[in-house]
């Protein structure tokens, strides 16, 4: 189902599915930010 997130075709998806996808992206971003902060706080090399 990769084509759904590939570009224009995203607008063909049901609005509800698109909302769910956006919610997933937001949670994923928050998770990544949290992980980065944890790494920084642990005094890693990066």
Image (cartoon, rainbow, N blue to C red):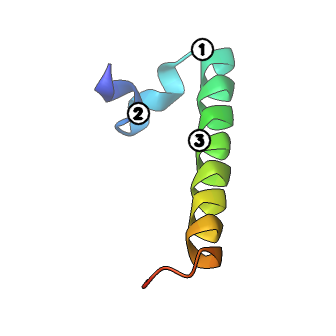
Element type at marker 1?
A: loop
Mark closest to the chain's N terminus, 3 or 2: 2
Q: Residue at x 56, y 82 (%)?
A: 43
> Distance between the Cα atoms at labels 3 and 2?
12 Å
Quarter of the view holding residue 39: bottom right
Element type at marker 2?
A: helix
Q: Residue 7: horizontal and vertical position, in percent?
A: 38, 40
For disc 1, the marked residue is: 14
Residue furthest to the left: 2
Quadrant holding the N terminus: top left
Q: Residue 28: horizontal and vertical position, in percent?
A: 59, 44
Q: Residue 6: horizontal and vertical position, in percent?
A: 34, 37
Between 10 and 24, the residue placed more toward the observer is 24
Mark closest to the chain's N terminus, 3 or 1: 1
Residue furthest to the front: 42
Quarter of the view holding residue 37: bottom right
Mark closest to the chain's N terminus, 1 or 2: 2
Between 14 and 30, the residue placed more toward the observer is 30
Q: Given contact means CB atoms under 8 Å apart, are the residues at marks 3 and 1 in contact?
A: no
Element type at marker 3?
A: helix
For disc 2, the marked residue is: 5
Q: Which mark is residue 25?
A: 3
Q: Given contact means CB atoms under 8 Å apart, are the residues at marks 1 and 2 in contact?
A: no
Q: Residue at x 47, y 30 (%)?
A: 10
């Amino acid at each position: 189902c990769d084509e759904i997130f590939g570009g224009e075709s995203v607008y063909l998806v049901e609005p509800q599915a698109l909302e769910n996808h956006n919610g997933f992206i937001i949670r994923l971003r928050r998770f990544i930010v949290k992980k980065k902060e944890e790494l920084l706080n642990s005094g890693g090399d990066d």
